[in-house]
Amino acid sequence: MDERYRPGYHFSPPSHWMNDPNGLVYYEGEYHLFYQHHPYSNKWGPMHWGHAVSHDLIHWQHEPIALFPDEHGAIFSGCCVVDFNNSSGLFAGSHGLIAIFTHADTCPKTGQPRQRQSLAYSSDKGRTWHKYEGNPVLTEIDLVDFRDPKVFWHAQSERWVMTIVAGDHARFYGSENLREWTLTGEFGQEEGSHDGVWECPDLFELPIDDSGHSKWVLIISIGDNPAFPEGSRTQYFIGEFDGNTFINDNSADHIMWLDHGRDNYAGVTWSDMHEQDGRRVIIGWMSNWKYANETPTGDWRGAMTLPRALSLTSRDEGIVLTQMPVWEIKQLRKESKSWSDVTVTQDVPFMIKTKDDLLEIEADIDIRTAGEVHIKMQSSGQSETIIGYDPVRQWLFIDRFKSGMTDFHPSFACQHGVFLVPENEKIKLHIWLDRNAVEVYANQGLVVLTDQIFPDATMNRISIGTNSGQVVLSSLHIHALQSIHIPNGTTEQTLGGDEA
Ligand code: FRU
């Protein structure tokens, strides 16, 4: 049981509980991934920062726990930056990594929860950490929710900028040394979705297509609220950052979601990516506070989404964010099969059996004469997860009612989706199937759905069909992927199988 749902190519902790990604930073050839971690239980508890390092964002080396709770409390979410010019004064003429995070404890006088911002620093590429002796560095005694700082160097104003959330709004602070912070602006009390408490902000600039123009993106995760079936999810805003505050380009009631599945939360982006790289790469926690503590994974619990490169594109409805997994994921392809112009009808679906359960599926589907299209991923037992498209409602959805184990929480079994307009009467789907999850990217990452699933047995059958009319699979590629846990050249099974 313990390893049955261990993902083959999504990051997961070696054991025990994991939630948000933290401290994402690129430094001296290594990508760092820290994460909210409870090392003594598979449920949320006193937070530590777990740690892993990668050279390619795909294969991860687990490292010892980086930050432990201390006299100021548990270590909640936060970020890392490279202090290249020693503006903190903590690196004696050299440079190093600074973690800026929330210390969470209880105020001894009032007994109220208290959240304050603190620093830790590392001079050995993140392997050992020292808490700054002047912690906490930023306190707002009137704010009960005050957490998840994300910091970047703002070249125009020649200072560090911190974006942080306080319940129902984001706040911006400026600093020259990362130790003293001044409030410069606030955003959001009346803007976007307030279905839950605001958490885990991020703020960055991105080019719009190849127009030569750019915009700022503000990411805000919103916590679970029992009143909404979606649970915890992530919204984003597009606008400007003037060095002090964020200015929304859209009307206050315009809400944009980062992901339309149920399991992508607390996503933030890597700091200090290599200059020649230029990508803005995000990773999210692939779970949902509604049921995160109950998922049937065993001794370990929690996984990350695939790392995704973000872009902005201009559409009729305005400027929107698109996302696709980083190109490095392609190295996992070990065997591929392709088809073109396959017509499927209600009576004759396309079917393939595979010996592999780690799959990537690229499908260009002509829906001109189709009824509802169903891509079914089936196990050797009873489980079936459906990715569907309804051309009448122009609705792309995931149905995980029969996806396997669902009874650990009443909200888990569900169908949910998103409006998707076909392009030239086609929809283009790119799907990643892992042992615990499915990620669906449509029309080059214009919309994305990420969902956990817990099938009763290995997924070994893919069928593509329709409930009326006919569907043409203009092109279809299925790639068997190798696991990130197994070194190259070992005996993983191959795609093989029979086509029906
Ligand atoms: C988001 C969050 C953060 C907080 C952390 C605690 O999932 O609630 O706001 O810092 O998790 O683990």
Image (cartoon, rainbow, N blue to C red):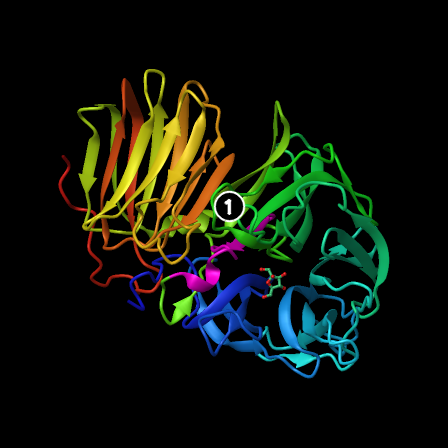
Depth check, front residue: 365 or 188: 188
Q: Is 290 within the magenta?
A: yes
Ligand 1: quadrant of the figure: bottom right
Indicate the quadrant where residue 94 lies.
bottom right
- How many numbered discs, if any? 1
Say left or right for 166 vs 375.
Answer: right
- Could you tell me if residue 30 is visible in this image? no
Where disc 1 sits, the SS reads loop
Q: Position of residue 265 (x, y in %)?
A: 54, 53
Task: Name the residue at 41% across, 73% down.
Answer: 15
- Residue that numbered label 1 is attached to: 229
Task: Name the residue at 22% across, 24% down.
Answer: 346
Q: Is 475 within the magenta?
A: no
Amino acid type at image mark 1: Pro
Q: Position of residue 250 (x, y in %)?
A: 72, 33
Work out which quarter of the rendered image holds the C terminus and state it. top left
Residue 371 versus residue 304 in the image, above or below: above
Task: Name the residue at 73% across, 72% down.
Answer: 112
Residue 54 versus residue 256 in the image, above or below: below
Work out which quarter of the rendered image holds the N terminus and state it. bottom left
Question: Which span is picked out in magenta?
Answer: 278-295
- Could you tell me if residue 204 is visible in this image? yes
Indicate the quadrant where residue 387 lies.
top left
Say left or right for 492 vs 318.
Answer: left
Depth check, front residue: 481 or 301: 301
Depth check, front residue: 343 or 488: 343
Q: Position of residue 62 (x, y in %)?
A: 45, 72
Residue 243 versus residue 107 in the image, above or below: above
